[in-house]
Image: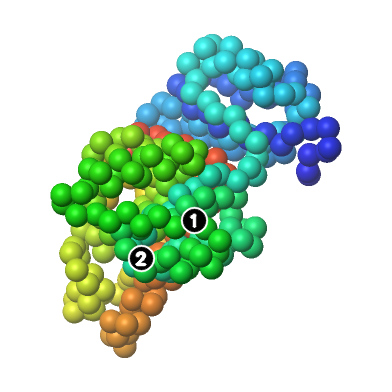
Amino acid sequence: MTASATTTPWVLTLSCPDRPGIVHAVAGLLAEHGGNITESQQFGDPDTGLFFMRVQVDSAAGRPELEKALSDLGERFSMTWRLDVAGRPVRTLVMGSTAAHCLNDLAFRQRSGLLPIDIVAVVSNHTTLASLAQFYGIDFHHVPVTPETKETAEARLLDLVRELDVELVVLARYMQILSDSLCRELEGRIINIHHSFLPSFKGARPYAQAHDRGVKLIGATAHYVTPELDEGPIIEQDVERVDHTHSVEALVALGQDVERRALARAVGWHAEHRILLDGHRTVVFR
């Protein structure tokens, strides 16, 4: 069901301590404001005692009216909540180094209308991806990084985030470690993709290391970035089976395919407000 010309499709996400009456209260509030619920998902975590909910609703009520009502409800249930227009393209900045597969996939999906994002800039510590960004009509920013210029480079990145009103930063095979302060500044709105060999195969040429050890599975993990390197809340993981017949080049090709798939799903779910943080874990309403 789609919203009519006089209604807006809203998406509401919330979390709070679990207790009776939450769903009834939320549904009642939306009904009082002329809301027609088109999608609703919920989860109560028995380990943390927290309740999570995602609701899409068509309503003629405006944002101020709904936010006032939700604020009152939030105080009653000690609730953290967020309201947005469903399907609104999320302003996104993509960071990469030299590998093009993830950037190309995200840009293609955006252009094809398959991802609700608006890539407003590509930032890279190399110039390799400049022509790809130009092909898609995306502004490219070359921000070199050395140990001596790292602080200046990260300050430039934050300037771009603010100037362009960026809501999501995606590390699309960006091969630089971000500082703890930058990770904290962008907490909850920066997603990374890496091969799932970590921490087994660290450093250079992980697929060559995997080939040498005769792995039977290769994969990728998309996660939120935190100061703890590659230990942020996991959003999505994907794998492919391999065997002794696969060369290093074949593993790299399969690995890139897995990486782009996992990253696209993670970015899409974030943009659709389907991910809620549950401590070091995520609740993903697919």
10 Å crowding of disc 2: few (<14), some (14-19), many (20+): some
Left or right of 77? Residue 56 is right
Residue 201: give x, y in percent of width and height.
20, 65
Is residue 261 shown to the viewer in this render? no
Query: Callout 2: helix, strand or loop?
Result: loop
Q: Position of residue 223 (x, y in %)?
A: 37, 49
Give the mark nearest the N terminus, 1 or 2. 2
Which structural element holds mark 1? Answer: loop
- Crowdedness near tag 1: few (<14), some (14–19) or many (≥20) residues, C-alpha within 10 Å: some
**Relative height, residue 42 to residue 101 (above, below):** above
Q: Which residue is mark 1?
A: 139
* Drawn side of residue 34 relative to residue 50, left or right: right
Three-letter code, disc 1: Asp
Give the x, y percent position of residue 14: 53, 28
In the image, which disc is placed on residue 108?
Answer: none
Between 181 and 285, which is closer to the camera in this rendering? 181
Residue with the mark numbered 2: 127
Is there CB contact under 8 Å for labels 1 and 2? Answer: no
Most distant residue in the bottom direction: 245
Which quarter of the rendering shows the N terminus? top right
- To which quarter of the image does residue 101 belong? bottom left
Q: Quadrant of residue 185?
A: top left
Please, what is the three-letter code of the amino acid marked with disc 2? Thr
- Where residue 19 sits in the image (x, y, percent)? 50, 19
Q: Is residue 80 visible?
A: yes
Task: Using the image, determine if residue 28 lies above or below residue 112.
Answer: above
Residue at x-position 40% and y-position 34%: 278
- Residue 222 sits in quarter: bottom left
Residue sitting nearer the eye, 108 or 41 = 108
The residue drawn where x is 22% and y is 48% is 150
Distance of mark 1 from mark 2, alpha carbons?
12 Å
Q: Residue at x 33, y 38 (%)?
A: 280
